[in-house]
Image (cartoon, rainbow, N blue to C red):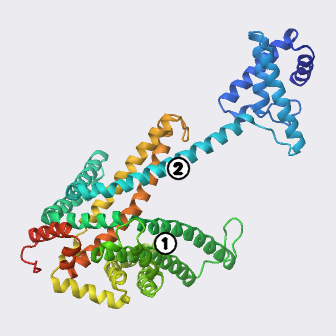
């Protein structure tokens, strides 16, 4: 009855501005439309798509059902004829527009509004999370300057407590390997904290000096964030070109089935190109920071503003005269990384213990080369040395000054990681609060709806803060090298910071300090 009644109702309503349905047809219309409206509200589209209505091409338009249910309410529950007329006219206008477009698809008003609303909510959440993450990350520089020593001690305790939770989690879940791993990590973290506790003041003085240098030349962080964007775009471009190349050369079809396996040397070259470019991008920023902090260390008047001339000068050197050294040092690490990826792919298809050991050895070699590069590139940024000259000078400097043990101290890196996690958590909580205040429904109802804003915020906070902390880490390496080579110059340019560093050094290694 619905097709005939839909036409008769609309005609009668247009002529008399009122509704009248006779006998059993009225009851049938009420029952049918209310049932359909209930299914619309519960989003059970698979249950109501089987119905057929006049001029709907086999589907019920959501806008039509809501308009028709308004008419039913007018018939069954009271004189709201004007409201029903507006609903019918709105549906007729949307239907006419749809017919004029000629696409034959139903115009779903509710669905379109909901999609647009979700889209706006996601964009708003991302923008606010980015702003909050950036502000919190910037605030951490001043926070680390004020509480550097306390943060380093907290980082040591954080490692111990985390290992304890892992062991406890193993006990709760009944996982013996997890318990053993947690206990082992707990013992190592506790012993490490005991051994380096006396070095905390010196590490804190380096962190304060490095954070001060970065805050005085905050514009250098622009190159770090720009490098993040470039690396992301490079990853997308690399993935597209690699997939297309192997798709053509290996005779693959649309289902991903290939006539042959990719040649190992092509895979190696693609991995090499990816890791080499990524290393060059990362090390270019490292050299830029080293050059900027070096200028601040020796001549603070030239590097004491957000966009000082020292920043641009350091970046120009890193992409011109120092670029060859950056590419050479990056290539060595990239070769190891590409080889390790080939070995890893072999290990996935093999249970050989030899392959597993080889991958582990390559991982250690990769770490050694990366750690060596961190210090070598400081010299490249400071004095423009070639990569080989820089490496030789770094080794000789630490041997001559008796500072070899300092290289093993990654106390500052522990703090930077902990701070990045903390900023990520705070940004995630802020995302949850924003979602609740502005009724942002991204992930659905209940706990799931709160989890998505938190994950958005945590991801933005952790990534943005990690980029800033990588700049601070480069600055710390530069301060250590500069102070090892020229402590008296530091006393002249930054006497307050120098006094703190001298006192901390004498406290940690009273027999190794030989400067006036």
Foreground disc of the pair 1, 2: 2
Give the quarter of the figure containing the N terminus. Answer: top right
Q: Residue at x 72, y 25 (%)?
A: 37
The disc label shown at residue 253, or none = none
Place of residue 302 in the rendered image (x, y in percent of width and height, measured from the top left): 35, 74
Give the quarter of the figure containing the C terminus. Answer: bottom left
Query: What SS does tag 1 mark?
Result: loop
Residue 50 shows up from this direction:
yes
482 left or right of 332 in image: left
The quadrant where residue 399 appears: bottom left
Place of residue 62 in the rendered image (x, y in percent of width and height, measured from the top left): 75, 32
Q: Residue at x 31, y 46 (%)?
A: 173
Q: Residue at x 39, y 64 (%)?
A: 218
- Give the Cα distance between marks 1 and 2: 43 Å
The quadrant where residue 361 appears: bottom left
505 left or right of 341 in image: left
Place of residue 475 in the rendered image (x, y in percent of width and height, measured from the top left): 32, 70
Query: What SS does tag 2 mark?
Result: helix
Q: Is residue 459 above or below residue 242?
A: above
Place of residue 243 in the rendered image (x, y in percent of width and height, measured from the top left): 63, 72
Q: How many marks?
A: 2
489 left or right of 213 in image: left
> Answer yes or no: do the residues labelled 1 and 2 have beta carbons within 8 Å?
no
The disc label shown at residue 127, or none = 2
Nearest the camera: 397 or 172? 397
Q: Residues within 10 Å of mark 2 (few under 14, many from 20)?
A: some
Q: Residues within 10 Å of mark 1 (few under 14, many from 20)?
A: few
Residue that lies at the very extreme toward the left in this rendered image: 511
Q: Which residue is mark 1?
A: 349
Q: Residue at x 69, y 28 (%)?
A: 39
């Amino acid at each position: 009855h619905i097709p005939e009644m839909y036409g008769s109702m609309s005609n009668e309503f247009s002529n008399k501005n009122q509704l009248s349905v006779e006998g059993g047809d009225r009851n049938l219309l009420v029952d049918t439309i209310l049932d359909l409206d209930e299914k619309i509200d519960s989003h059970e589209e698979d249950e109501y798509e089987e119905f057929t209505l006049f001029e709907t091409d086999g589907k019920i338009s959501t806008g039509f059902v809501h308009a028709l249910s308004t008419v039913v309410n007018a018939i069954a529950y009271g004189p709201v004829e004007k409201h029903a007329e507006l609903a019918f006219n709105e549906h007729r206008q949307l239907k006419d527009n749809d017919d004029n477009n000629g696409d034959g698809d139903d115009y779903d008003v509710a669905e379109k509004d909901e999609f647009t609303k979700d889209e706006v909510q996601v964009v708003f959440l991302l923008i606010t999370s980015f702003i909050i993450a950036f502000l919190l990350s910037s605030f951490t520089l001043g926070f680390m300057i004020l509480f550097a020593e306390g943060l380093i001690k907290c980082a040591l305790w954080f490692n111990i407590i985390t290992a304890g939770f892992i062991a406890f989690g193993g006990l709760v879940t009944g996982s013996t390997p997890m318990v053993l791993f947690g206990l082992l990590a707990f013992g190592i973290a506790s012993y490490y904290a005991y051994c380096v506790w006396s070095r905390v003041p010196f590490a804190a003085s380096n962190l304060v000096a490095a954070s001060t240098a970065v805050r005085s030349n905050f514009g250098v962080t622009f190159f770090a964030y720009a490098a993040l964007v470039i690396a992301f775009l490079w990853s997308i471009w690399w993935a597209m070109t690699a997939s297309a190349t192997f798709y053509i050369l290996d005779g693959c079809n649309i289902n991903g089935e290939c006539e042959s396996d990719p040649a190992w040397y092509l895979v190696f070259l693609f991995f090499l190109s990816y890791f080499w470019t990524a290393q060059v991008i990362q090390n270019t920023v490292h050299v830029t920071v080293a050059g900027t902090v070096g200028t601040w260390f020796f001549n603070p008047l030239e590097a004491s503003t957000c966009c000082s001339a020292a920043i641009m000068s350091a970046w120009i050197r890193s992409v011109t005269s120092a670029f060859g050294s950056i590419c050479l040092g990056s290539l060595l690490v990239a070769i190891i990384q590409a080889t390790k990826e080939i070995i890893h792919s072999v290990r996935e298809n093999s249970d050989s213990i030899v392959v597993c050991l080889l991958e582990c050895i390559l991982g250690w070699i990769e770490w050694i080369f990366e750690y060596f590069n961190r210090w070598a590139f400081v010299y490249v940024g400071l004095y423009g040395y070639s990569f080989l000259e820089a490496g030789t000078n770094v080794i000789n400097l630490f041997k001559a000054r008796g500072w070899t043990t300092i290289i093993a101290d990654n106390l500052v890196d522990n703090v930077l990681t902990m701070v990045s996690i903390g900023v990520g958590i705070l940004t995630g909580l802020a995302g949850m609060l924003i979602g609740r205040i502005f009724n942002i429904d991204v992930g659905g109802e209940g706990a799931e709806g709160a989890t998505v804003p938190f994950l958005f915020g945590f991801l933005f906070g952790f990534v943005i803060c990690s980029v800033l902390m990588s700049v601070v880490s480069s600055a710390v390496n530069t301060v250590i090298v500069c102070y090892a080579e020229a402590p008296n110059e530091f006393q002249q340019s930054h006497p307050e910071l120098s006094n703190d560093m001298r006192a901390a050094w004498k406290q940690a290694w009273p027999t190794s300090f030989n400067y006036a």
